[in-house]
């Protein structure tokens, strides 16, 4: 006879840092922190990299190469993880990331550094997607929200201290050690994740059945979008040197990019249809306007205003603080989402226009600091609302595909704006006063993008 369990027997709920998940959680957080630190730190030392490698003409492309490679890796790794489990793609992603860091630190030319950045992007994109799948497979349902919140929180510390630490390391030992210094920290993270990785067999594969879950079609779309974006940026950068060839490359790249996006994004997104299609695109508008300026702030402050790398990193740090505050306040607000999105975009637009003053003669470069606090606040307030709204508007069986679409527009928005900004700097020139002129032009262009977001925000309803 089976004795029934006493009804008052205490049931211990699963905990994120409980004995069964503690080591895996610390491993997930450490990997996320390392990837975040790299992302938040590179911008500070990029002026020094450009000087030593004589690569100022590739300043923008070095960021874009990382983002475009990440875009391709995000799509392919998501499909790979769905069908074969997350263990192999995660290990492959970490290996690529570490290899890219080593290649970047050892780069002896601009071309090698550009290749290293692309390898880093492949690794980071693959690792992050596999990490998210790992969380969904390893942790029980009631723990997953806390796990994803912890991953988001793991970006906060690198965002706050990463630029300052990278600036200090770059000044004391050189920019190469910013890349080399992260590599040894990957080993303990992998060791902590070994138990979770053993659970990542192909038996756990959960392939989707929607039109955006077909491996061949989505791989071709990702290839077209990533390759098209790269060709487009290369063509734009060559327009002033070889107008005919640059125009052909630009047109071909744009055609491939449009084809890829048509497959990757929700239907009618490129026509700004109301609701989900425009909501997904709004993520790209936010990223383009903010990061299109953010990536060039260290260059402008160091080359035009004579700031040190550490001082220039302060502006990026304050932007991260504003972002955290905006995200928190957004979570406490209720009401119509499209109004919050419009307010966030408007704050970014105004902040960009104020920030451009930091490059003008007779005005202190420190103007960028308060301006970028407000810009970060607008990003945290508006962009977080975009992500939440997109998931609310998504059918349950399309939440994965639409999450990937959000990432795609995010990366493409940043890659295109930074690449075009770099092309503008190359067109204007690399002398301090020319960089100042280029920065003002970049800021005006990105303010226009943010203004477009404020106008289109109503179509997210």
Image (spheres, rainbow, N blue to C red):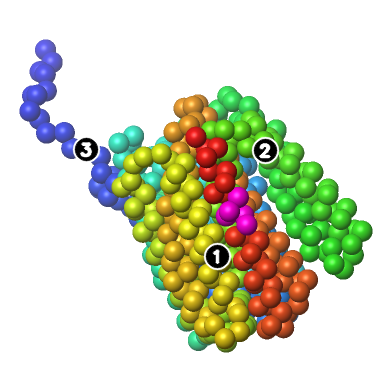
What mark, if any, has residue 352 been given in the picture? 1
Seen at 78% across and 54% down, the residue is 231
- Which residue is nearer to you in this view: 419 or 8? 419
In primary-sequence order, the first of circles 1 and 2 is: 2
Q: Report whether 169 appears left or right of 451.
A: left
Q: Is residue 356 above or below residue 454?
A: below
Residue 449 belongs to the span the image colors magenta: yes
The residue at which mark 3 appears reads as: 13
Question: Outermost residue toward the right?
Answer: 244
Label 2 Cα crowd, 10 Å radius (few <14 / some 14-19 / many 20+): some
Q: In the displayed structure, would residue 344 be above or below residue 280?
A: below
Pointer 2: what residue? 270
Kind of element beneath mark 2: helix
Please tell me which residue is depicted at 59% across the width and 25% down the height of the picture.
Answer: 210
Instruction: Tell me the element at label 3.
Output: loop
Mark 3 or mark 1, which has the lower sequence index?
3
Region in magenta: 448-452
Q: Give the secondary structure at mark 1.
A: helix
């Amino acid at each position: 006879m089976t004795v029934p369990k006493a009804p008052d027997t205490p049931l211990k709920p699963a905990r994120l840092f409980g004995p069964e998940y503690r080591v895996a959680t610390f491993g997930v957080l450490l990997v996320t922190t390392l990837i975040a630190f790299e992302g938040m730190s590179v911008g500070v030392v990029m002026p020094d990299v450009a000087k030593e490698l004589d690569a100022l003409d590739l300043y923008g492309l070095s960021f874009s190469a990382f983002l475009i490679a990440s875009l391709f890796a995000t799509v392919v790794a998501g499909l790979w993880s769905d069908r074969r489990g997350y263990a192999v793609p995660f290990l492959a992603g970490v290996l690529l990331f570490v290899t890219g860091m080593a290649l970047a630190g050892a780069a002896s030319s601009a071309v090698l550094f550009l290749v290293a950045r692309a390898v880093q992007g492949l690794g980071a994109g693959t690792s992050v997607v596999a990490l998210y799948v790992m969380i969904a497979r390893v942790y029980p349902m009631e723990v997953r929200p806390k796990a994803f919140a912890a991953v988001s929180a793991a970006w906060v510390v690198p965002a706050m201290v990463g630029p300052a630490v990278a600036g200090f390391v770059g000044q004391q030992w050189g920019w190469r050690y910013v890349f080399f210094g992260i590599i040894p920290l990957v080993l303990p993270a992998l060791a902590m994740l070994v138990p979770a990785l053993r659970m990542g067999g192909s038996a756990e594969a959960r392939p989707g059945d929607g039109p955006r879950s077909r491996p061949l079609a989505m791989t071709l779309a990702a290839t077209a979008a990533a390759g098209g974006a790269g060709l487009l940026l290369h063509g734009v950068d060559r327009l002033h040197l070889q107008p005919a060839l640059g125009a052909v490359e630009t047109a071909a790249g744009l055609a491939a990019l449009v084809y890829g996006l048509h497959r990757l994004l929700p239907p009618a997104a490129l026509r700004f249809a109301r609701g989900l299609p425009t909501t997904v695109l709004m993520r790209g508008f936010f990223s383009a306007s903010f990061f299109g300026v953010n990536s060039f702030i260290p260059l402008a402050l160091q080359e035009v205003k004579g700031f040190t790398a550490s001082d220039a990193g302060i502006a990026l740090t304050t932007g991260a603080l504003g972002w955290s505050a905006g995200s928190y306040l957004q979570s406490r607000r209720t009401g119509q989402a499209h109004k919050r999105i419009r307010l966030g975009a408007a704050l970014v637009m105004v902040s960009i226009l104020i920030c451009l003053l930091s490059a003008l003669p007779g005005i202190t470069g420190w103007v960028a600091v308060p301006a970028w606090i407000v810009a970060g606040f607008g990003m945290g307030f508006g962009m977080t609302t975009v992500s939440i709204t997109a998931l609310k508007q998504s059918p349950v069986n399309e939440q994965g595909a639409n999450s990937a679409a959000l990432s795609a527009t995010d990366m493409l928005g940043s890659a295109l704006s930074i690449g075009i900004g770099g092309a503008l700097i190359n067109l204007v020139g690399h002398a301090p006063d020319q960089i100042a002129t280029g920065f003002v032009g970049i800021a005006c262009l990105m303010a226009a993008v943010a203004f477009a977001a404020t106008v289109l925000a109503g179509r997210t309803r």
